[in-house]
Image (cartoon, rainbow, N blue to C red):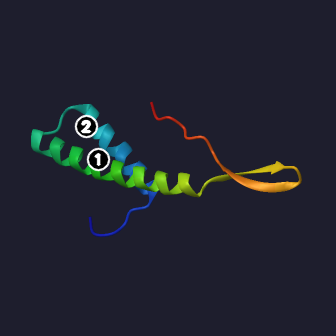
Amino acid sequence: MDKKINFEDAIKELEDITSQLSKGNLSLDRSIELFERGMELKKICSEDLGKARAKIKKLVQKDGDYSEEEIEEISSE
């Protein structure tokens, strides 16, 4: 991959790939190419979400002081 794709564009491309693959009218070689690209995009999205999750904090007021707490991780299952 030549340049870094942003999260939103990666999701859009993944949706397009999913649509193309679900139609079932592609050659095996093209299907494999799209699948490989999809896996690259999934990795990019997972990394971006991981970075975002690490930055997200919730401010909680405790005894007049504010402290940061990690937001509970959302399961992708």
Asked which quadrant contains residue 4, the reply is bottom left
Residue under label 1 = 38
- Residue 19: image location, x then y, percent: 32, 38
| Gap in angstroms between the C-alphas marked 2 and 1 | 10 Å
Q: Of 72 and 6, which appears nearest the observer?
A: 72
Residue positioned most to the right: 64
| Residue nearest the viewer, comparing 60 with 35 | 60
Mark nearer the N terminus (2 vs 1): 2
Left or right of 64? Residue 21 is: left
On screen, residue 5 versus residue 62, left or right, reads: left
Residue 60 position, x and y percent, is 77, 49
Q: Amino acid at mark 2?
A: Leu
Q: Amino acid at mark 1?
A: Gly
User: Where does residue 32 sit, x and y in percent of width and height?
Assistant: 16, 43
Give me the residue at 61% from left, 54% from top: 56
Secondary structure at badge 1 equals: helix
Q: Are marks 2 and 1 in contact (CB under 8 Å)?
A: yes
Q: Residues within 10 Å of mark 2 (few under 14, many from 20)?
A: some
Point out the image quarter for the N terminus: bottom left
Q: Decide: is 18 above or below 70.
A: above
Residue at left offset 80%, top offset 56%: 66
**Secondary element type, mark 2:** helix
In percent of width and height, residue 43 lies at 34, 51
In this view, the mark in front (2 or 1): 1
Determine which residue is flagged by label 2.
21
What residue is rendered at 63% in x and 45% in y?
71
Disc 1 crowd rating (10 Å Cα; few below 14, some 14-19, many 20+) is many
Residue 71 lies, with reference to residue 24, above or below; the image says below
Residue 29 is left or right of residue 12, and the answer is left
Q: Quadrant of the C terminus?
A: top left
